[in-house]
Image (cartoon, rainbow, N blue to C red):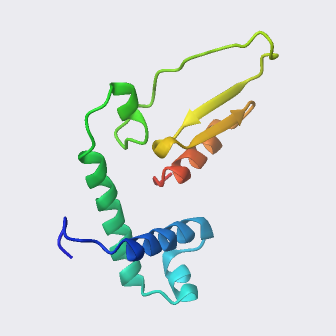
């Protein structure tokens, strides 16, 4: 199907679900496809196609403030602006809130292993660890 042509939304949603399930399964693509009776070549095609569509959507979004562009950007720097706040009514705790692309949020209570947190965020953002 040519890019920009009418897309089958149900098929795209179905493949998004399949790719997400494979990621969460903890098994190789080959094993997942065997168990799910999905052609491995079709899986790789759709995974690549969905990534390209996502990148295309992000490319065509209106320009945003620099802080907004950092969210989920593969080229985002290792450091991002941090805003600290403290409510006098609530005892201070080591708590971090991370906003991911799509507005999803992760709340982290300290102590936390830095590498484990990086791995979890990479999985949530579907990036290789």
Q: Which residue extends farthest top?
A: 88
Q: Camera-side residue: 116 or 104?
A: 104
Q: Position of residue 84 (x, y in %)?
A: 60, 16
Q: Is residue 125 above or below residue 63?
A: below
Residue at (41, 75) in percent of width and height: 10
Q: Camera-side residue: 60 or 111?
A: 60
Q: Is residue 30 above or below residue 80?
A: below
> Residue 107 sits in which quadrant?
top right
Q: Position of residue 97 (x, y in %)?
A: 62, 31
Relative horizontal placement of residue 2, taking residue 120 as reference (left or right): left
Q: Is residue 111 above or below residue 81?
A: below
Relative horizontal placement of residue 54, taking residue 81 as reference (left or right): left
Residue at (26, 38) in percent of width and height: 62
> Residue 50 sits in which quadrant?
bottom left
Q: Is residue 45 above or below residue 106?
A: below
Relative horizontal placement of residue 79, taking residue 53 as reference (left or right): right
Q: Position of residue 42 (x, y in %)?
A: 37, 82
Q: Position of residue 91 (x, y in %)?
A: 82, 16
> Residue 8 sits in which quadrant?
bottom left
Number of marks present in the image shown: 0
Task: State the quadrant of the N terminus.
Answer: bottom left
Residue at (29, 52) in percent of width and height: 57
Residue at (26, 34) in percent of width and height: 63
Relative horizontal placement of residue 119, taking residue 40 as reference (left or right): right
């Amino acid at each position: 199907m040519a890019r920009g042509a009418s897309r089958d939304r149900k098929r795209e949603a179905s493949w998004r679900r399949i790719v997400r399930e494979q990621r969460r399964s903890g098994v190789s693509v080959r094993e997942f496809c065997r168990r799910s009776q999905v052609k491995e070549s079709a899986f790789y095609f759709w995974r690549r196609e969905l990534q390209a569509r996502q990148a295309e959507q992000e490319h065509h979004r209106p320009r945003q403030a620099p802080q907004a562009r950092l969210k989920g950007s593969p080229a985002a720097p290792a450091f991002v602006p941090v805003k600290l706040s403290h409510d006098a009514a609530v005892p201070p705790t080591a708590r971090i809130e991370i906003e991911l692309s799509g507005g999803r949020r992760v709340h982290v209570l300290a102590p936390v292993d830095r590498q484990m947190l990086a791995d979890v965020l990479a999985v949530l953002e579907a990036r290789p660890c």
